[in-house]
Image: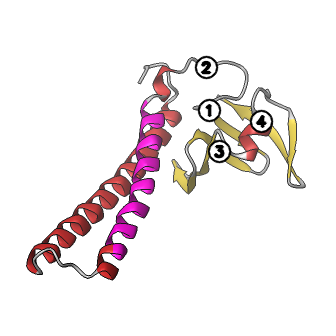
């Protein structure tokens, strides 16, 4: 990451990277365990694994694969934030302070705390980001009947 990133941004990115990496590692562990278990069962019954069990195992593996892919994309986005040059308009990698809360534009994430301040991660696909994109401090946007006043962003 560039040394020009504000300290709070570095802390937010580090927090989200740790959270996403832990989820990724957990999902990969479950995936590997599931695949290993299915292989052992198949070998134990001479390759005659019950079709129902095989289907269940494959469904779990496939469901996890899409989650693993999404987590990998999130990790890649977070790792690339240091290369984005700041500007006056809302963009990927910005910390956004509104009258309704604080947000970080990168990846979707439940509310978390950094230095006693609450933040929520939003992706560039979120309705809030889409409305705030290109806006500057002081602008107002409305999403689903909720008004947001942009206090500051960096």
Give yes or no for contact between labels 3 and 2 (Cβ–Cβ under 8 Å).
Answer: no
The residue at 53%/53% (across/down) is 113
Q: Is residue 76 above or below residue 62?
A: above
> Mark 1 or 2 closer to N-term?
2
Give yes or no for contact between labels 4 and 2 (Cβ–Cβ under 8 Å).
Answer: no
**Which residue is labeled 1 in the image?**
94
> Mark 3 or 2 closer to N-term?
2
For the C terminus, give its image quadrant: top right
Q: Which stretch is magenta?
A: 55-79
> Mark 3 or 4 closer to N-term?
3
Give yes or no for contact between labels 3 and 4 (Cβ–Cβ under 8 Å).
Answer: no
Query: For the residues marked 3 and 2, what is the alpha-carbon distance in whole angstroms?
Result: 16 Å
**Which residue is labeled 2 in the image?**
86
* Mark 1 burial class by Cα count in 10 Å: few <14, some 14-19, many 20+: many
**Which residue is labeled 3 in the image?**
103
Query: For the residues marked 4 and 2, what is the alpha-carbon distance in whole angstroms?
Result: 15 Å
For the N terminus, give its image quadrant: top left
């Amino acid at each position: 990451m560039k040394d020009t990133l504000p300290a709070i941004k570095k802390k937010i990115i580090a927090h989200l990277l740790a959270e996403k990496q832990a989820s990724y590692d957990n999902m990969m562990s479950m995936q590997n365990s599931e695949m290993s278990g299915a292989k052992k069962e198949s070998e134990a019954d001479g390759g005659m694994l019950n079709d129902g069990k095989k289907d269940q195992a494959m469904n779990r593996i496939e469901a996890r694969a899409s989650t693993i892919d999404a987590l990998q994309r999130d990790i890649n986005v977070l790792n690339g934030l240091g290369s984005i040059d700041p500007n006056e308009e809302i963009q990927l990698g910005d910390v956004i302070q509104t009258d309704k809360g604080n947000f970080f534009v990168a990846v979707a994430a439940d509310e978390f705390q950094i230095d006693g301040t609450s933040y929520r991660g939003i992706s560039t696909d979120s309705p809030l980001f889409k409305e705030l994109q290109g806006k500057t401090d002081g602008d107002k946007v409305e999403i689903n009947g909720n008004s947001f006043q942009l206090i500051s962003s960096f």
